[in-house]
Image (cartoon, rainbow, N blue to C red):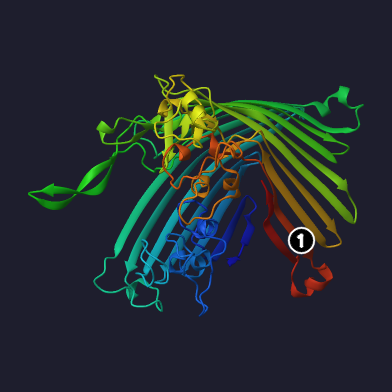
Amino acid sequence: KRYTVRANIESQILPKLKMGVNLIPTYRIRDEVRSDGHWADNGVINSALSAMPMSPIYAADGTTYSSQTELAAPYNFPGVTNPVANITEYHSRLTTANILSNVFAEYSILKDLKYRASGNVSFTTNRRNAYRTSRMPLNQILPPSVATGTAFSDQSVGWLFNQTLDYNKDINDDHSIGVLIGMESTKNQQESMTATGAAYPNDLVETLNASASGTTTTATSSIVQNSTVSYFARINYSFRDKYLLNFSVRRDGSSIFGPDRRWGNFPAASIGWRLHEENFMKSLTFISEAKLRASYGLSGNNAFSSFYPYAALLSTDNYAFNNVLANGLRASSPENRNLSWEKNQQFDIGIDLGLFNNRLYVTADYYDRITKDLLLSVNVPTITGFSTVVQNIGRMQNRGWEFSVTSRNFTGDFTWNTSANLSWNRNKVLALGPTGDPIRSGTGVGETNITMIGQPIGSFFGYTQSGVFLNQADLDANPHDATSKPGDVKYADINGDKIINADDRGIIGNNQPDFIYGITNSFSYKGFDLNIAIQGTQGGQILNLSRRFFENLERNQNQLTTVLDRWRSESEPGNGVTPRANARTTGQNNAISSRWIEDGSYFRIQNVTLGYRLPASLIKRAGLQQVRLYVAAQNLYTQT
């Protein structure tokens, strides 16, 4: 449930003074299901995929089985949670209250000079109460188990203050000049606290104070802050509204970085040419607008997952002192006061073209962006006591094309408008510090990604599968792991040393699509309106690691249909990709490899909205100007 109110007040207080207030309070209640779609979270998605399809959901008394372990043979396998019980026996409600406010004042100092000040304040609170009943298994212990409850609260406050002086002057109908100078400051603070309780006497009361006395209740809290200050200036010039020039500069400071590296300077310039204003274009009456434009500039990026990446942070730990375990502190991240802004150096060139009185409007853009001083987590020797350190290291290039088309297909009582977009981007790492060493990263299952020169950032990393070993002769004739047997996965010997080991891993794919597209059609007729939005991508890969568990015939888990075409014998080699039945998730058959790479293309009906505007004659008696009723559906259909 979501409740939103919007209030706007704007008034000309004095002949030269205008002020306004905008308030948007929002309150939302969300009942959550325990799952983020990840294979390891044991949530409803994972349990629905894992559970045997013939397993009963309900017992004779109508209650849900918590897991397959409770079932009678042959369904009593451990470890798989009933997906229905995962919904009914786990209760989580998130309530969010948000107030977004904006206040502005605009004063005309002179005819051509205005001063404007504005301030935004955002206040948000989140409260989540979650409870896992005793009907759910805990650490493989069958129900009744220990019920657990969690209370989470989060409060964030952010403000933004902006003030500008804006001067605009037209000279002799030929020249137009605009000058803007200003400053902006922001500050954000977030406080959060989490507490858990256990050993509830029953499932009737789910609040933390109902947990049994004497049981361990854990609590954690955190406070994070960040702030920015910016000074900026911009000059616009146009000649006869045909030739356009723009120069701007920003000086930004961020608390994300160390005291000596917080400031960055970012200039930019752009030019434009309105061709349709030229005399030689007047005869082309079907062209209603034509504009060429180009720009070049620098911008900064301080978006990073840590609020204090430059500082040496401490965390609690235990130490043995005189044979007694004592509480203490340890460094959890190293200090790096040389961290500074990522810098984006971008060139753009584009065209805007309107045809037939702008009934058809086309834009095309080409961009080339070089990002320098990338903020990346770099692996460091474990002798330092840390696994990674954040550094400004390397350069990266993104370049590509963006196209959009807007058309008014029908006008009148029945209208039909279409907007479509198409874009593609090519990403490449150009440099990685003085040594150029690749940067590897991964998950709990091992290294899955690599960033290396000449390749897209974060490319998928692993072995390249070249088939399965058909028989012993095939195994003997090809490089293999010491544990390999006929029917196991065959990997390419990348370095040619006749041994399959970690040195044979390489890039096996990346998530960069060939192109991205979107189409929106809007229809209206006598108060009714219909909007249909479609989006999708073509190309790019995903690394589907859930298949490591759904193609290994391990214990009790449900399996994908691909295992039906696995290697069984020399005479039944299967599809040449799926190896023999081997009930384990370790070993070479389940190593990170191209076997798990899939096409990431998809087509999605993203949104469909049907609305109706009540006639003015019906609502004006109530003092209303407009009332629109609508129903909307999100993500109606997805095809992969």
> x, y (%) of residue 530?
79, 57
Q: Is residue 146 above or below residue 547?
A: below
Can you identify the residue that label 1 sits on? 610
Does 572 sit left or right of 530 as displayed? left
Q: Is residue 450 above or below residue 219?
A: above
Would you identify the image quadrant in which residue 423 lies? top right
Frontmost residue, 586 versus 394: 586
Q: Is residue 471 above or below residue 145?
A: above
> x, y (%) of residue 284?
90, 28
Q: Residue at x 28, y 33 (%)?
A: 382
Amino acid type, callout 1 = Leu
> x, y (%) of residue 50?
51, 56
Q: Quadrant of the N terminus?
A: bottom right
Is residue 244 among the parts visible in the rendering? no
Frontmost residue, 245 versus 502: 502
Q: Residue at x 51, y 37 (%)?
A: 487
